[in-house]
Image: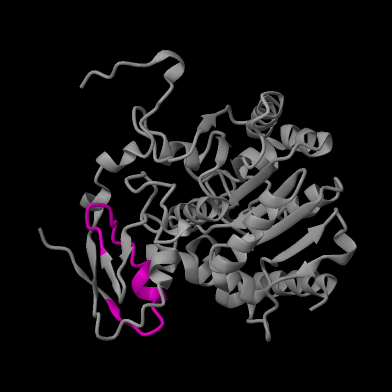
Amino acid sequence: MTKEDLELFASGHRACAGCGEGTAVRQILKAAGPNTVATICTGCLEVISTGYPETAWEIPIIHAAFENSASVAAGVEVALKELGRKEGVNVIAFGGDGGTFDIGFQALSGMLERGHDITYVCVDNEAYMNTGIQRCSSTPYGASTTTSPVGKLSIGESRPKKPIAAICAAHGIPYTATASIAYINDLKKKVKKAVETEGPAFLHVFAPCPTGWRHGSDSTIEIARLAVETGVFVLWEAEDGDICNLKITQKPKKRKPVKDYLKSQRRFAHLSDEDIEHIQKEVDEKCEKYGF
Amino acid sequence: MTVKITIGAVNRDHGSSRIYKTGGWRTMRPVVDLEKCISCYKCYDYCPDGAIKKLDKGITYDFDYCKGCGICAKECPVQAIVMIKEEK
Protein backbone atom coordinates (compact mmCIF):
# COMPACT_ATOMS: atom_id res chain seq x y z
CA MET A 1 0.00 0.00 0.00
CA THR A 2 1.42 3.35 -1.00
CA LYS A 3 0.70 6.72 0.57
CA GLU A 4 -1.67 7.57 -2.26
CA ASP A 5 -3.86 4.53 -1.55
CA LEU A 6 -5.06 6.30 1.60
CA GLU A 7 -8.66 7.40 1.14
CA LEU A 8 -8.88 10.86 2.71
CA PHE A 9 -12.35 11.49 1.27
CA ALA A 10 -14.36 8.65 2.78
CA SER A 11 -17.01 6.55 1.07
CA GLY A 12 -20.58 7.05 2.18
CA HIS A 13 -20.66 10.68 1.04
CA ARG A 14 -23.96 11.71 -0.54
CA ALA A 15 -22.84 12.77 -4.01
CA CYS A 16 -25.10 11.69 -6.86
CA ALA A 17 -24.07 8.54 -8.72
CA GLY A 18 -21.39 9.49 -11.24
CA CYS A 19 -20.57 12.84 -9.57
CA GLY A 20 -17.46 14.46 -11.04
CA GLU A 21 -16.77 16.32 -7.83
CA GLY A 22 -16.48 13.02 -5.91
CA THR A 23 -13.64 11.91 -8.17
CA ALA A 24 -12.06 15.37 -8.11
CA VAL A 25 -11.92 15.82 -4.33
CA ARG A 26 -10.87 12.21 -3.73
CA GLN A 27 -7.90 12.56 -6.10
CA ILE A 28 -6.96 16.08 -4.97
CA LEU A 29 -6.70 14.90 -1.35
CA LYS A 30 -4.67 11.85 -2.40
CA ALA A 31 -2.21 14.16 -4.14
CA ALA A 32 -2.07 16.72 -1.31
CA GLY A 33 -1.64 14.06 1.39
CA PRO A 34 -2.82 13.80 5.00
CA ASN A 35 -0.92 16.88 6.27
CA THR A 36 -3.59 19.15 4.87
CA VAL A 37 -6.11 21.52 6.42
CA ALA A 38 -9.08 22.38 4.22
CA THR A 39 -11.81 24.98 4.23
CA ILE A 40 -15.05 24.44 2.34
CA CYS A 41 -17.85 26.82 1.54
CA THR A 42 -21.52 26.37 0.76
CA GLY A 43 -22.13 24.23 -2.29
CA CYS A 44 -22.41 20.63 -3.39
CA LEU A 45 -19.17 19.73 -1.61
CA GLU A 46 -20.55 20.87 1.74
CA VAL A 47 -23.89 19.14 1.22
CA ILE A 48 -22.44 15.81 0.13
CA SER A 49 -19.59 15.53 2.64
CA THR A 50 -20.85 16.95 5.93
CA GLY A 51 -24.25 15.48 6.77
CA TYR A 52 -24.05 16.21 10.52
CA PRO A 53 -23.20 14.29 12.69
CA GLU A 54 -21.15 12.55 10.02
CA THR A 55 -18.28 13.74 7.90
CA ALA A 56 -16.54 12.25 4.87
CA TRP A 57 -13.29 14.07 5.61
CA GLU A 58 -10.24 12.35 7.09
CA ILE A 59 -8.35 15.65 7.39
CA PRO A 60 -9.20 18.71 9.51
CA ILE A 61 -11.72 20.92 7.74
CA ILE A 62 -13.65 24.02 8.64
CA HIS A 63 -16.91 24.91 6.98
CA ALA A 64 -17.26 28.59 6.13
CA ALA A 65 -20.16 30.56 4.66
CA PHE A 66 -20.78 30.81 0.93
CA GLU A 67 -18.47 33.74 0.25
CA ASN A 68 -15.50 33.26 2.51
CA SER A 69 -13.72 29.95 1.94
CA ALA A 70 -10.63 31.94 0.89
CA SER A 71 -10.66 34.36 3.81
CA VAL A 72 -11.23 31.62 6.41
CA ALA A 73 -8.32 29.73 4.83
CA ALA A 74 -6.27 32.93 5.15
CA GLY A 75 -7.08 32.98 8.88
CA VAL A 76 -6.10 29.32 9.23
CA GLU A 77 -2.82 29.93 7.42
CA VAL A 78 -1.91 32.97 9.55
CA ALA A 79 -2.84 31.11 12.76
CA LEU A 80 -0.68 28.12 11.81
CA LYS A 81 2.23 30.45 11.06
CA GLU A 82 1.81 32.33 14.36
CA LEU A 83 1.76 29.04 16.27
CA GLY A 84 4.86 27.88 14.39
CA ARG A 85 3.00 24.90 12.97
CA LYS A 86 2.78 25.78 9.28
CA GLU A 87 5.92 23.83 8.28
CA GLY A 88 4.88 20.86 6.14
CA VAL A 89 1.16 21.62 6.38
CA ASN A 90 -0.86 22.44 3.27
CA VAL A 91 -3.85 24.76 3.47
CA ILE A 92 -6.41 24.15 0.74
CA ALA A 93 -9.52 26.25 0.25
CA PHE A 94 -12.25 24.48 -1.68
CA GLY A 95 -15.00 26.29 -3.52
CA GLY A 96 -17.58 25.36 -6.10
CA ASP A 97 -18.02 27.51 -9.15
CA GLY A 98 -20.74 29.58 -7.45
CA GLY A 99 -18.58 30.13 -4.38
CA THR A 100 -15.63 31.10 -6.56
CA PHE A 101 -16.81 32.84 -9.75
CA ASP A 102 -19.70 34.76 -8.15
CA ILE A 103 -20.16 34.84 -4.40
CA GLY A 104 -16.64 34.19 -3.08
CA PHE A 105 -14.78 36.21 -5.67
CA GLN A 106 -13.99 39.19 -3.47
CA ALA A 107 -12.60 36.98 -0.69
CA LEU A 108 -10.63 34.98 -3.25
CA SER A 109 -9.16 38.07 -4.89
CA GLY A 110 -8.19 39.48 -1.48
CA MET A 111 -6.51 36.24 -0.44
CA LEU A 112 -4.50 36.11 -3.69
CA GLU A 113 -3.51 39.75 -3.37
CA ARG A 114 -2.32 39.37 0.26
CA GLY A 115 -0.08 36.48 -0.80
CA HIS A 116 -1.15 33.78 1.65
CA ASP A 117 0.44 30.34 1.29
CA ILE A 118 -2.81 28.70 0.24
CA THR A 119 -3.96 26.53 -2.64
CA TYR A 120 -7.43 27.54 -3.77
CA VAL A 121 -9.28 24.78 -5.63
CA CYS A 122 -12.38 25.63 -7.62
CA VAL A 123 -14.37 22.52 -8.57
CA ASP A 124 -16.40 23.73 -11.52
CA ASN A 125 -19.67 22.10 -12.59
CA GLU A 126 -20.91 25.19 -14.39
CA ALA A 127 -24.02 26.14 -12.36
CA TYR A 128 -25.49 26.19 -8.82
CA MET A 129 -26.25 22.47 -8.80
CA ASN A 130 -27.26 21.57 -5.24
CA THR A 131 -29.97 24.24 -5.13
CA GLY A 132 -31.43 23.11 -8.43
CA ILE A 133 -29.30 24.12 -11.44
CA GLN A 134 -29.33 27.93 -11.41
CA ARG A 135 -27.06 29.77 -13.86
CA CYS A 136 -23.76 31.17 -12.66
CA SER A 137 -21.04 33.24 -14.31
CA SER A 138 -19.37 29.88 -14.97
CA THR A 139 -22.30 28.59 -17.07
CA PRO A 140 -21.29 28.37 -20.74
CA TYR A 141 -23.16 30.05 -23.58
CA GLY A 142 -26.19 28.07 -24.74
CA ALA A 143 -26.66 25.91 -21.65
CA SER A 144 -30.20 25.55 -20.36
CA THR A 145 -30.58 26.01 -16.60
CA THR A 146 -33.62 26.67 -14.41
CA THR A 147 -32.86 30.41 -14.34
CA SER A 148 -31.76 30.60 -17.97
CA PRO A 149 -34.41 28.33 -19.46
CA VAL A 150 -34.83 27.69 -23.16
CA GLY A 151 -37.83 29.28 -24.85
CA LYS A 152 -39.01 30.96 -28.00
CA LEU A 153 -36.92 34.04 -27.24
CA SER A 154 -34.17 32.41 -25.19
CA ILE A 155 -31.24 30.22 -26.22
CA GLY A 156 -30.59 29.38 -22.58
CA GLU A 157 -27.58 31.03 -20.96
CA SER A 158 -26.76 34.05 -23.10
CA ARG A 159 -23.41 35.07 -21.63
CA PRO A 160 -20.02 33.40 -22.12
CA LYS A 161 -18.12 31.67 -19.32
CA LYS A 162 -15.97 33.89 -17.14
CA PRO A 163 -12.24 33.07 -17.59
CA ILE A 164 -11.65 32.67 -13.86
CA ALA A 165 -8.21 31.04 -14.01
CA ALA A 166 -6.83 33.82 -16.22
CA ILE A 167 -8.34 36.42 -13.89
CA CYS A 168 -6.65 34.78 -10.89
CA ALA A 169 -3.35 34.48 -12.77
CA ALA A 170 -3.58 38.20 -13.52
CA HIS A 171 -3.12 38.80 -9.77
CA GLY A 172 0.50 37.77 -10.41
CA ILE A 173 0.28 34.70 -8.17
CA PRO A 174 3.11 32.09 -8.29
CA TYR A 175 1.04 29.24 -9.74
CA THR A 176 -2.22 28.95 -11.66
CA ALA A 177 -3.52 25.90 -13.52
CA THR A 178 -6.63 24.39 -15.06
CA ALA A 179 -7.21 20.65 -14.74
CA SER A 180 -9.78 18.01 -15.60
CA ILE A 181 -10.92 14.86 -13.82
CA ALA A 182 -10.44 12.93 -17.07
CA TYR A 183 -6.67 13.47 -16.79
CA ILE A 184 -5.96 12.23 -13.26
CA ASN A 185 -2.14 12.18 -13.48
CA ASP A 186 -2.11 15.73 -14.85
CA LEU A 187 -4.52 16.82 -12.09
CA LYS A 188 -2.44 15.23 -9.31
CA LYS A 189 0.79 16.68 -10.69
CA LYS A 190 -0.77 20.14 -10.65
CA VAL A 191 -2.11 19.70 -7.10
CA LYS A 192 1.36 18.68 -5.89
CA LYS A 193 2.94 21.63 -7.66
CA ALA A 194 0.32 23.99 -6.22
CA VAL A 195 0.73 22.89 -2.59
CA GLU A 196 4.52 22.89 -2.87
CA THR A 197 4.49 26.42 -4.24
CA GLU A 198 5.28 29.08 -1.65
CA GLY A 199 2.44 31.61 -1.78
CA PRO A 200 -1.02 31.49 -3.33
CA ALA A 201 -1.93 29.00 -6.05
CA PHE A 202 -5.18 28.65 -7.95
CA LEU A 203 -6.53 25.45 -9.50
CA HIS A 204 -9.59 25.38 -11.76
CA VAL A 205 -10.86 21.80 -11.92
CA PHE A 206 -13.45 20.82 -14.53
CA ALA A 207 -15.96 18.30 -13.13
CA PRO A 208 -19.11 17.33 -15.06
CA CYS A 209 -22.43 16.96 -13.20
CA PRO A 210 -24.81 14.24 -14.50
CA THR A 211 -27.78 15.79 -12.67
CA GLY A 212 -27.33 19.34 -13.95
CA TRP A 213 -25.86 18.67 -17.36
CA ARG A 214 -28.43 15.97 -18.05
CA HIS A 215 -26.20 13.10 -19.13
CA GLY A 216 -25.87 9.47 -18.05
CA SER A 217 -24.06 8.87 -14.78
CA ASP A 218 -21.53 6.69 -16.62
CA SER A 219 -20.52 9.48 -19.05
CA THR A 220 -18.96 11.89 -16.54
CA ILE A 221 -15.33 11.12 -17.39
CA GLU A 222 -16.03 10.74 -21.11
CA ILE A 223 -17.57 14.22 -21.23
CA ALA A 224 -14.72 15.75 -19.21
CA ARG A 225 -12.31 14.24 -21.74
CA LEU A 226 -14.41 15.46 -24.69
CA ALA A 227 -14.29 19.01 -23.31
CA VAL A 228 -10.49 18.92 -23.55
CA GLU A 229 -10.38 17.08 -26.90
CA THR A 230 -12.74 19.60 -28.51
CA GLY A 231 -10.97 22.64 -27.07
CA VAL A 232 -13.98 23.73 -24.98
CA PHE A 233 -11.85 23.53 -21.82
CA VAL A 234 -8.13 24.13 -22.24
CA LEU A 235 -5.66 22.60 -19.77
CA TRP A 236 -2.79 24.95 -19.01
CA GLU A 237 -0.54 26.18 -16.24
CA ALA A 238 1.15 29.52 -15.68
CA GLU A 239 3.88 30.57 -13.29
CA ASP A 240 4.14 33.96 -11.61
CA GLY A 241 0.99 35.14 -13.32
CA ASP A 242 2.69 35.12 -16.69
CA ILE A 243 -0.43 34.43 -18.78
CA CYS A 244 1.37 35.44 -21.97
CA ASN A 245 3.69 32.44 -21.56
CA LEU A 246 1.32 29.82 -20.26
CA LYS A 247 2.09 26.17 -20.89
CA ILE A 248 -0.59 24.03 -22.53
CA THR A 249 -0.41 20.68 -20.70
CA GLN A 250 -2.82 18.63 -22.85
CA LYS A 251 -2.77 19.53 -26.50
CA PRO A 252 -5.19 17.42 -28.56
CA LYS A 253 -3.47 16.21 -31.75
CA LYS A 254 -6.53 16.95 -33.81
CA ARG A 255 -9.40 18.81 -32.19
CA LYS A 256 -12.74 17.00 -32.32
CA PRO A 257 -15.80 19.01 -33.44
CA VAL A 258 -17.53 20.86 -30.58
CA LYS A 259 -20.75 19.18 -31.73
CA ASP A 260 -19.54 15.90 -30.18
CA TYR A 261 -19.30 17.61 -26.80
CA LEU A 262 -22.58 19.53 -27.06
CA LYS A 263 -24.59 16.53 -28.26
CA SER A 264 -23.48 14.47 -25.26
CA GLN A 265 -25.54 16.58 -22.83
CA ARG A 266 -29.23 17.37 -22.72
CA ARG A 267 -28.63 20.93 -21.42
CA PHE A 268 -27.46 21.71 -25.00
CA ALA A 269 -30.08 19.55 -26.75
CA HIS A 270 -32.03 22.57 -28.08
CA LEU A 271 -29.10 24.11 -29.99
CA SER A 272 -29.62 24.37 -33.74
CA ASP A 273 -26.88 23.66 -36.29
CA GLU A 274 -26.46 27.41 -36.61
CA ASP A 275 -25.94 27.81 -32.85
CA ILE A 276 -23.44 24.97 -32.83
CA GLU A 277 -21.55 26.58 -35.70
CA HIS A 278 -21.42 29.83 -33.72
CA ILE A 279 -20.04 28.04 -30.65
CA GLN A 280 -17.53 26.17 -32.82
CA LYS A 281 -16.29 29.50 -34.21
CA GLU A 282 -15.84 30.92 -30.70
CA VAL A 283 -13.95 27.81 -29.56
CA ASP A 284 -11.73 28.01 -32.67
CA GLU A 285 -10.92 31.62 -31.89
CA LYS A 286 -10.15 30.78 -28.26
CA CYS A 287 -7.87 27.89 -29.25
CA GLU A 288 -6.05 30.10 -31.71
CA LYS A 289 -5.36 32.51 -28.85
CA TYR A 290 -3.90 29.62 -26.87
CA GLY A 291 -1.78 28.71 -29.87
CA PHE A 292 -3.20 25.44 -31.20
CA MET B 1 -33.09 9.70 16.47
CA THR B 2 -31.71 12.31 18.82
CA VAL B 3 -28.40 13.90 17.98
CA LYS B 4 -26.44 15.65 20.72
CA ILE B 5 -24.95 18.72 19.11
CA THR B 6 -21.40 19.48 20.23
CA ILE B 7 -20.22 23.00 21.02
CA GLY B 8 -19.54 24.79 17.74
CA ALA B 9 -20.83 21.68 15.94
CA VAL B 10 -17.26 20.32 16.11
CA ASN B 11 -17.13 16.82 14.69
CA ARG B 12 -14.18 14.63 15.69
CA ASP B 13 -15.42 11.43 14.00
CA HIS B 14 -13.38 11.83 10.83
CA GLY B 15 -14.49 9.58 7.98
CA SER B 16 -17.71 8.76 9.83
CA SER B 17 -19.77 9.00 6.65
CA ARG B 18 -18.77 5.34 6.18
CA ILE B 19 -21.63 4.31 8.48
CA TYR B 20 -24.01 5.45 5.72
CA LYS B 21 -24.14 2.69 3.11
CA THR B 22 -24.79 4.32 -0.24
CA GLY B 23 -24.86 0.90 -1.93
CA GLY B 24 -28.62 0.91 -1.39
CA TRP B 25 -28.98 3.52 -4.14
CA ARG B 26 -27.74 1.11 -6.80
CA THR B 27 -29.97 0.04 -9.69
CA MET B 28 -27.16 -1.34 -11.85
CA ARG B 29 -24.35 -3.53 -10.58
CA PRO B 30 -20.81 -3.78 -12.03
CA VAL B 31 -19.37 -7.24 -12.63
CA VAL B 32 -15.66 -7.58 -13.37
CA ASP B 33 -14.08 -10.36 -15.42
CA LEU B 34 -10.71 -10.82 -13.70
CA GLU B 35 -9.45 -12.92 -16.64
CA LYS B 36 -9.74 -9.88 -18.88
CA CYS B 37 -8.62 -7.29 -16.28
CA ILE B 38 -5.13 -5.88 -16.98
CA SER B 39 -4.81 -4.19 -13.53
CA CYS B 40 -4.44 -0.68 -14.98
CA TYR B 41 -6.60 0.62 -12.08
CA LYS B 42 -8.26 3.29 -14.22
CA CYS B 43 -11.61 2.32 -12.66
CA TYR B 44 -10.06 2.75 -9.19
CA ASP B 45 -8.82 6.24 -10.12
CA TYR B 46 -12.10 7.42 -11.65
CA CYS B 47 -14.53 5.99 -9.05
CA PRO B 48 -16.25 8.96 -7.33
CA ASP B 49 -17.06 6.86 -4.26
CA GLY B 50 -13.83 5.01 -3.52
CA ALA B 51 -15.85 1.82 -3.86
CA ILE B 52 -13.19 -0.08 -5.81
CA LYS B 53 -10.38 -1.82 -3.96
CA LYS B 54 -7.08 -2.69 -5.59
CA LEU B 55 -5.93 -6.32 -5.46
CA ASP B 56 -2.39 -7.45 -6.36
CA LYS B 57 -3.94 -8.53 -9.60
CA GLY B 58 -7.30 -7.05 -10.55
CA ILE B 59 -9.87 -5.23 -8.46
CA THR B 60 -12.81 -5.90 -6.19
CA TYR B 61 -15.91 -3.87 -5.36
CA ASP B 62 -17.15 -2.65 -2.01
CA PHE B 63 -20.87 -2.99 -2.62
CA ASP B 64 -21.63 -1.17 0.63
CA TYR B 65 -20.77 2.06 -1.21
CA CYS B 66 -20.92 1.42 -4.99
CA LYS B 67 -23.77 3.57 -6.34
CA GLY B 68 -23.73 1.77 -9.69
CA CYS B 69 -22.93 4.85 -11.79
CA GLY B 70 -21.15 2.77 -14.43
CA ILE B 71 -18.07 4.99 -14.90
CA CYS B 72 -15.78 2.00 -14.28
CA ALA B 73 -17.45 -0.07 -17.01
CA LYS B 74 -17.32 2.80 -19.52
CA GLU B 75 -13.70 3.73 -18.80
CA CYS B 76 -12.29 0.19 -18.74
CA PRO B 77 -9.86 0.01 -21.70
CA VAL B 78 -10.38 -3.76 -22.18
CA GLN B 79 -14.13 -3.94 -21.46
CA ALA B 80 -13.58 -6.23 -18.48
CA ILE B 81 -16.49 -4.69 -16.56
CA VAL B 82 -20.18 -5.04 -17.49
CA MET B 83 -23.21 -3.51 -15.78
CA ILE B 84 -26.08 -5.83 -14.94
CA LYS B 85 -29.44 -5.07 -13.38
CA GLU B 86 -29.32 -5.04 -9.58
CA GLU B 87 -31.63 -7.60 -8.03
CA LYS B 88 -32.21 -7.69 -4.31
Tell which of A89 and A132 is nearer to you.
Answer: A89
Q: Return the x and y of residue A255 as percentages of the image width and height.
A: 67, 82
Residue at the spot 39% in from the left edge and 35% down from the top edge = B14
Pick the quarter of the image with the N terminus of chain B: top left
- Does A252 sit left or right of A52 as displayed? right
- Does B84 sit left or right of A194 as displayed? left
Tell which of B34 and A88 is nearer to you.
Answer: A88
Tell which of A286 and B74 is nearer to you.
Answer: B74
Residue B72 located within the stretch drawn in magenta:
yes
Residue found at the far top of this picture: B7
Task: Name the image quarter holding residue A281.
Answer: bottom right
Task: Name the image quarter holding residue A14.
Answer: top left
Q: Which residues are magenta?
A: B61-81
Could one spot residue A105 in this view of the protein? yes
Could one spot residue A141 in this view of the protein? no
As drawn, A50 above or below A144: above
* Colour mode of the rendering: one colour
Q: Return the x and y of residue B59 as percentages of the image width and height.
A: 30, 70
Residue at the spot 53% in from the left edge and 29% down from the top edge = A62
Residue A239 located within the stretch drawn in magenta:
no
Q: Return the x and y of residue A259 as percentages of the image width and height.
A: 60, 76
- Does A269 sit left or right of B56 as displayed? right
Pick the quarter of the image with the C terminus of chain B: bottom left
As drawn, A181 above or below A175: below
- Does A164 sit left or right of B10 as displayed? right
Q: Return the x and y of residue A87 as percentages of the image width and height.
A: 67, 38
User: What is the total number of numbered labels drawn onto the structure image?
Assistant: 0
Task: Name the image quarter holding residue A102.
Answer: top right
Residue found at the far left of this picture: B88
Q: Report the predominant secondary structure element of the magenta stretch.
A: loop
Residue at the spot 28% in from the left edge and 19% down from the top edge = B3
